[in-house]
Image (cartoon, rainbow, N blue to C red):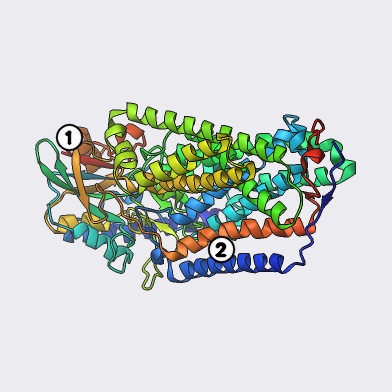
C-alpha cells in the first residue's frame, strides 16, 4: 500500500516538474498558458466542480469583419463543411448586431454558452447531452441518436447537426449526431494545465484581445477579476440559465 | 341488440392484394428514402441547422397525436358506457396501435443515428452512474409513454377478444384511457417545454394536443372504417355513421376553441403579437396560408359545416369532413413545427441581427421528396398493419347495420 502511495507521489512529482518546466517555458514565450499548475489534471482524473470554465467577450473589442476566432475554432476541431452555411456545422459564428434605435453596430462571437442549467441537457432522451462537473457542456457522440431535440431547446442556436459524411477528423465526429463548441475541452484537459481555447488564442494573436478564458470560480483569475470590475451580461438572462459565457459592453 | 359477430377479412380478393401491394410500395419508397438520408446525410432533405425538424416530423407527430385519439371510440364505449360504440372497440384499439407504429417508424427513421437507439438501454440505463438523469427529458418520458401505450392497448385488446378475460377489460380500459391522455400530454409538452422558442413555451399546448387528438384520431378511424365496410360489402348503418359524424363535429369545434384561445393569448403579449404571431398568421407566407386555408378553413370551418348540414348524406359527409380534418391536422403540424422554427429566436431584443446562418431572419425551408416519402410511409405502415390485423384477427363486426347496433332501432 505504502509503495503504491510512494509511487503515486513520485508520479505527481515528476508530472509537477514536467508541467512546471513546460509552463515556465511556454509562459515566457507566448503567455497563453493559464495560471495554475494546480488546475492541471491527468487523463484519468475526472473534471472537478471546483472549477467552472467560462469565457468573457468584450463586444467593443470584437472587430467587425474579423472572423479569426471562427476559423481558428474550426481548424482546431476539424470542423469542415461543404460550403452551405445552413447545413454546415457552426461551432462558433460571428453575429452582427445593429441597434434599431441608435444604429450602433457591434459584432460578437456566439457559441455554446455552457449554461449551468443547460436546456439541451434537460431534454436529451439518452444522456448524450451532458454537462461536466467543471461546467463544460458536451455531446457524447456514441450516445447521440440524432433526434435534434437539444437543437430545438437551445436558446442560442449554438448546436449543429452533422448533415454530411465526415471525412477528415481531428476529434471524434459522426454524421447524424449533434455537436457544438466544447470550449476546447482537450485544451482544458491538457496534462500540462488548461490552455486557452483556440478562439481566444487566435483573437489574442490577432491583437484584438476581445476574449478571456478562465475559471469563474477562481477569484484570482483574470476573467473573474474583469467580471467583478466591469460586470458582464448573459444572453437571454431572462431564462435563468446562468451561462458560462458572458459579454461586456453589449449595448 | 343482437350479439355482434366479429370475423376476419377474407383477404383473398384481387383488390385486397392490390391494396397491400400499393401499401408495400409506399412503405418501400419511404424506407429507401430513409436509407438515402442515412447514407448521404440529412443534407439531401430540406432540413437545416435552423429547421431541424422537417416534414417527417409533421407526419410523425400528427400520427402519434392521432393514435391516442383513435382509441377514443373504445374508451367512449367502455369507460363512458356508450354501448353503441362497443362493436367498434377492437378496431379502435388496433388502429390506435398501428397509427402509433406508423408515427414512431417515421420518427425513428428520421433520426440521425437510429442504430444508437440499440445501445442506449445498455450504455445509458444499465451502466450509467446517473440513470435518473434522462427522466428530465420529456422525450425520455415519451419513450415510456409510447411503448407503454402499445403494451396496455395490446392487453386491452387481448382481454376484449378472449371471452374468459372480458371481465377485466373494463379496468384495463380505464387505465388505457388515462395513459392515452398522458401520452398526448407528453407529446404536447415536447413543444410546451421549449422555453427558448416563442412559438412554443406554453402549457396550453398539452391540452390543445389532447383535443386535437380527439379530432385527428376519429377522422382516421372514420376513413378506415367506411371504406373497409364498403369494399367488403358489410353493412354499415346510418345510426353509427351519424353518431361518428356528430362526434367529429364536437371535436373539431373544441379544437377550434383551443386554437382561438392559444392565439388570442399570444396576441396579448406585445412581443409575440408583433413577432411570431404576425409572422404565422399574417405573414403572407406558406405558414399563414397553411394556418388560414389548411388548419382553419379546410380543417375546421368546412368540416363543421359539412357535418352539421343536414342535406348531405351522412356517410359522404363523414368521409369528406374526416378527410378535411386530416388535411387540417397536417397543416396544423406544419404551422406549429416548421413555422415555429422558421421564426428567429429573440436573442437580442431591439437589435437587427445578422449572421452566416441568418440568425435574425426567417429560416427558409423546402421539403425534398425524401422527406415526403418518409412521411407518407408512416401512413403506409399504419394502413398495412391495420389491414393485416383485420385479416388475422376477428376485430370487424360482421354487420354494423342499424338493427344490429341499436337496441331501440325499429326498421
Residue A94 pos. (x, y %): 21, 53
Kindly state the secondary structure of the residue where label 2 is placed: loop
**Residue at x 56%, y 61% (from the top left corner):** B377
Judging depth in this view, the residue of A218 and A137 nearest the camera is: A137
**Residue at x 76%, y 48% (from the top left corner):** B235
**Residue at x 46%, y 46% (from the top left corner):** B333
Answer left or right for B300 relative to A243.
right
Answer left or right for A26 relative to B259.
left
Image mark 1: chain? A
Judging depth in this view, the residue of B327 and A133 nearest the camera is: B327
**Quarter holding the N terminus of chain B?**
top right
Point out which mark residue B345 bears.
none
Q: Is residue A108 above or below residue B108?
A: above
Mark 2 vs 1: CB contact within 8 A = no
**Quarter holding the C terminus of chain B?**
top right
Q: Which residue is mark 1?
A: A230
CA distance for labels 2 and 1: 49 Å
Front: mark 2 or 1: 2
Q: Could one spot residue B296 in this view of the protein?
A: yes
**Quadrant housing residue B248:** top right
**Quadrant housing residue A162:** bottom left
Q: Which residue is mark 2?
A: B115
Residue B279 pos. (x, y %): 30, 41
Answer left or right for B402 relative to B296.
right
**Quadrant housing residue B105:** bottom right
Amino acid at each position: 500500500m505504502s509503495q503504491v502511495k510512494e509511487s503515486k507521489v513520485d508520479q505527481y512529482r515528476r508530472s509537477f516538474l514536467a508541467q512546471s518546466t513546460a509552463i515556465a517555458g511556454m509562459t515566457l514565450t507566448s503567455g497563453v498558458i493559464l495560471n495554475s499548475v494546480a488546475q492541471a489534471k491527468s487523463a484519468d482524473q475526472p473534471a472537478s466542480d471546483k472549477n467552472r470554465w467560462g469565457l468573457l467577450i468584450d463586444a467593443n473589442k470584437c472587430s467587425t469583419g474579423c472572423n479569426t476566432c471562427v476559423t481558428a475554432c474550426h481548424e482546431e476541431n476539424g470542423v469542415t463543411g461543404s460550403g452551405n452555411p445552413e447545413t454546415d456545422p457552426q461551432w462558433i459564428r460571428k453575429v452582427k448586431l445593429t441597434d434599431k434605435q441608435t444604429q450602433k453596430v457591434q459584432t460578437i462571437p456566439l457559441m455554446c454558452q455552457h449554461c449551468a442549467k443547460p436546456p439541451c441537457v434537460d431534454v436529451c432522451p439518452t444522456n448524450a447531452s451532458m454537462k461536466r462537473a467543471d461546467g463544460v457542456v458536451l455531446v457524447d457522440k456514441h450516445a447521440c441518436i440524432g433526434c435534434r431535440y437539444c437543437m430545438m431547446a437551445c436558446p442560442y442556436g449554438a448546436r449543429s447537426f452533422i448533415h454530411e459524411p465526415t471525412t477528415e477528423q481531428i476529434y471524434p465526429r459522426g454524421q447524424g449526431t449533434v455537436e457544438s463548441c466544447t470550449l476546447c475541452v482537450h485544451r482544458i484537459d491538457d496534462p500540462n494545465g488548461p490552455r486557452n481555447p483556440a478562439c481566444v488564442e487566435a483573437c489574442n494573436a490577432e491583437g484584438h484581445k476581445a476574449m478571456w478564458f478562465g475559471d469563474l470560480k477562481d477569484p484570482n483569475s483574470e476573467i473573474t477579476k474583469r467580471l467583478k470590475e466591469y460586470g458582464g451580461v448573459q444572453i437571454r438572462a431572462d431564462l435563468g440559465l446562468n451561462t458560462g459565457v458572458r459579454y461586456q459592453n453589449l449595448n | 341488440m343482437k350479439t355482434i359477430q366479429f370475423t376476419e377479412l377474407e383477404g383473398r380478393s384481387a383488390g385486397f392484394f392490390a391494396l397491400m401491394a400499393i401499401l408495400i410500395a409506399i412503405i418501400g419508397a419511404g424506407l429507401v428514402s430513409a436509407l438515402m438520408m442515412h447514407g448521404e446525410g440529412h443534407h439531401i432533405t430540406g432540413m437545416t441547422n435552423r429547421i431541424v425538424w422537417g416534414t417527417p416530423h409533421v407526419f410523425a407527430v400528427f400520427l402519434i397525436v392521432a393514435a391516442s385519439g383513435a382509441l377514443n371510440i373504445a374508451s367512449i364505449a367502455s369507460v363512458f358506457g356508450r354501448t353503441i360504440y362497443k362493436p367498434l372497440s377492437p378496431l379502435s384499439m388496433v388502429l390506435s396501435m398501428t397509427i402509433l407504429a406508423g408515427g414512431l417508424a417515421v420518427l425513428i427513421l428520421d433520426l440521425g443515428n437510429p442504430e444508437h437507439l440499440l445501445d442506449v438501454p445498455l450504455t445509458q440505463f444499465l451502466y450509467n452512474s446517473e440513470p435518473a438523469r434522462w427522466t428530465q427529458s420529456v422525450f425520455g418520458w415519451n419513450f415510456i409513454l409510447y411503448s407503454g401505450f402499445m403494451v396496455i392497448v395490446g392487453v386491452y385488446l387481448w382481454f376484449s377478444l378472449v371471452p374468459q378475460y372480458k371481465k377485466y377489460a373494463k379496468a384495463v380500459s380505464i387505465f388505457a384511457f388515462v395513459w392515452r391522455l398522458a401520452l398526448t400530454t407528453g407529446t404536447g409538452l415536447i413543444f410546451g417545454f421549449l422555453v427558448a422558442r416563442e412559438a412554443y413555451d406554453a402549457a396550453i399546448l398539452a391540452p390543445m394536443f389532447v383535443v386535437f387528438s380527439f379530432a385527428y384520431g376519429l377522422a382516421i378511424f372514420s376513413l378506415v372504417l367506411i371504406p373497409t365496410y364498403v369494399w367488403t360489402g358489410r353493412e354499415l348503418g346510418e345510426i353509427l355513421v351519424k353518431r361518428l359524424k356528430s362526434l367529429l363535429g364536437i371535436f373539431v369545434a373544441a379544437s377550434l376553441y383551443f386554437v382561438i384561445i392559444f392565439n388570442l393569448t399570444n396576441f396579448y403579449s406585445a412581443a409575440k403579437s408583433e413577432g411570431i404571431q404576425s409572422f404565422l398568421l399574417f405573414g403572407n407566407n406558406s405558414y399563414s396560408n397553411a394556418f388560414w386555408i389548411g388548419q382553419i378553413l379546410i380543417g375546421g370551418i368546412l368540416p363543421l359545416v359539412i357535418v352539421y348540414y343536414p342535406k348531405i348524406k351522412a356517410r359522404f359527409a363523414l368521409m369528406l369532413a374526416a378527410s378535411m380534418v386530416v388535411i387540417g391536422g397536417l397543416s396544423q403540424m406544419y404551422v406549429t413545427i416548421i413555422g415555429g422554427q422558421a421564426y428567429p429566436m429573440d436573442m437580442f431584443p431591439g437589435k437587427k441581427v445578422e449572421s452566416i446562418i441568418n440568425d435574425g431572419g426567417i429560416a427558409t425551408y423546402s421539403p425534398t421528396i425524401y422527406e415526403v416519402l418518409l412521411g407518407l410511409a408512416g401512413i403506409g405502415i399504419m394502413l398495412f398493419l391495420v389491414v393485416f390485423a383485420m385479416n388475422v384477427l376477428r376485430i370487424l363486426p360482421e354487420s354494423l347495420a342499424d338493427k344490429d347496433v341499436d337496441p331501440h332501432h325499429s326498421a
